[in-house]
Image (cartoon, rainbow, N blue to C red):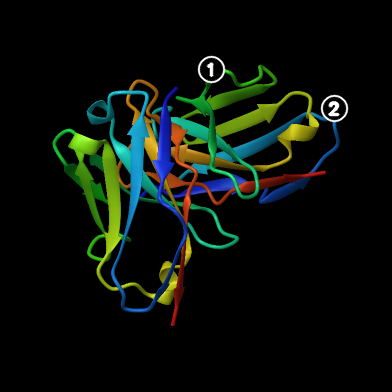
């Protein structure tokens, strides 16, 4: 199985800050990486697919980058509604696997 | 509007049978794989496996194979997740999610089904 490791596990930030969350795969996943946002008690929501493609309706302050085994999600200017938990997810091979999550706190 | 609607919360006892459901609407249900994802209380997301409602082709995660069963009834656009013998460790929220192949990602999620199993 491909292991996905996110860092940090939690981060404190303020409205207006720029935040970057890292995700490392245990092997090359050829860019097949998605990012999801989850708020308490809610289902995850797709933000980014295939490393850097913004899902329809997602604000442009969200962006994804990376290649090979190292990827990142960046939020350029935090808004109050962005405080949530973020997960990376590899869709390169079975079984699909998620990172452990990064909790973004005020 | 595309939607995945899941069945309601369940409270069961260890060893009991349970089947939960996920009904698709607003899109061609047989065209997209449906995945099941577990989230234990206070924990992260775990990919359990995936089923194609069109032909019932299934891929299980090794971590869940043998303990759960996926099925689908395409005539009513519904996918199912079932357990023959629940365990207390099955207590979790279970999500179904629609896999969009062009994105290689889950672009639509159900609202989740909370399952509580007492020992």
Q: Residue furthest left?
A: B55
Q: Which of the chains bears the disc numbered 1?
A: A
The residue drawn where x is 27% and y is 66% is B67
Label 2 secondary element: loop
Label 1 secondary element: loop
- Circle 1 is placed at which residue position? A56
Q: Quadrant of residue B33?
A: top left
Q: Position of residue B15 (x, y in %)?
A: 31, 78
Residue B25 horizontal side relative to residue B113, left or right:
left
Which of the image's four quarters has the C terminus of chain B? bottom left
Q: Position of residue B18 (x, y in %)?
A: 31, 65
Residue A16 — which label? 2
Tell if the residue under mark 2 belongs to the same chain as the one under mark 1: yes
The residue drawn where x is 47% and y is 26% is A49
The residue drawn where x is 30% and y is 54% is B81
Residue B41 horizontal side relative to residue B55, left or right:
right
Q: Nearer the viewer, residue A30 or B79?
A: B79
Q: Position of residue A36 (x, y in %)?
A: 55, 36
């Amino acid at each position: 199985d491909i292991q996905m490791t996110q860092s940090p596990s939690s981060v404190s930030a303020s409205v207006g800050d720029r935040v970057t969350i890292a995700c490392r795969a245990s092997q090359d996943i050829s860019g097949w990486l998605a990012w999801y946002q989850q708020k308490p008690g809610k289902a995850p929501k797709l933000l980014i697919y295939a490393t850097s493609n913004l899902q329809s309706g997602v604000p442009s302050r969200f962006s994804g980058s990376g290649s090979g085994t190292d990827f990142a999600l960046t939020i350029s200017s935090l808004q109050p509604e962005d405080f949530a938990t973020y997960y990376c997810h590899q869709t390169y091979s079975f079984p699909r696997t998620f990172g452990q999550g990064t909790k973004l706190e005020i | 509007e595309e939607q995945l609607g899941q069945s309601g919360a369940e409270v069961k006892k260890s060893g009991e049978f349970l089947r939960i459901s996920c009904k698709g609407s607003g899109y061609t249900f047989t065209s997209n794989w449906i995945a099941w994802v577990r989230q234990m209380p206070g924990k992260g997301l775990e990919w359990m496996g995936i089923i194609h409602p069109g032909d019932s082709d299934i891929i299980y995660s090794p971590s869940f194979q043998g303990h759960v069963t996926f099925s689908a009834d395409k005539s009513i656009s519904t996918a199912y997740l079932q357990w023959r013998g629940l365990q207390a460790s099955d207590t979790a929220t279970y999500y179904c999610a629609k896999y969009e192949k062009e994105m290689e990602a889950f672009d639509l999620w159900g609202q989740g089904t909370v399952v509580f199993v007492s020992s």
